[in-house]
Image (cartoon, grey):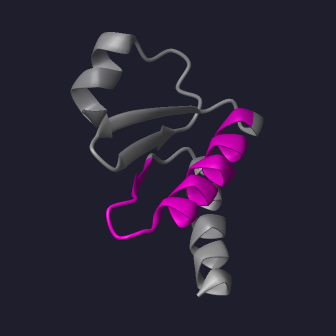
Amino acid sequence: RAVRCVQVWDIAVEAIRARKAVILSTQYMNEEEAQRAVDFLAGAAMVLYGELECVGEGLILITPNLEGITEERKRKWFI
């Protein structure tokens, strides 16, 4: 199970690198798995100058660096 999770995380990081938004749902993860996933993707977002924010219970939105996009537009598109 851990290998599959890491593979999925790698796909998520590649999506962020390709300037695509990623939504992480921790709904079906235990607390330890959820924390590990959030920590991993938060680190990736930081390195890639992206952003991470909670958009609902158990839902984390990870966005790439969207310079030139206003906060208002970002809220409209992603939330």
- The residue that appears at 27% across and 44% down in the rendered structure is 57
Picture quadrant where residue 12 is located:
bottom right
- The residue that appears at 34% across and 23% down in the rendered structure is 74
Q: Nearer the viewer, residue 23 or 30?
A: 30
Q: In the orientation shown, which residue stands out farthest toward the right? A: 47
Magenta segment main secondary structure: helix
Is residue 74 covered in magenta? no
Q: In the orientation shown, which residue stands out farthest toward the front? A: 31
- The residue that appears at 66% across and 67% down in the rendered structure is 10
Image coords of residue 72 (percent x, y): 29, 12
Residue 36 in the figure: left or right of residue 77: right
* 2, above or below 57, in the image: below
Query: Is residue 48 visible to the viewer in this orientation of the structure?
Result: yes
Image coords of residue 70 (percent x, y): 39, 11
Image coords of residue 25 (percent x, y): 36, 58
Residue 15 in the figure: left or right of residue 39: left
Q: Give the range drawn in magenta.
A: 22-46
Residue 4 in the figure: left or right of residue 34: right
Q: Which of 62 and 16 is in front in this view?
A: 62
* 24, above or below 45, in the image: below
Picture quadrant where residue 26 is located:
bottom left
Q: Quadrant of the N terminus?
A: bottom right
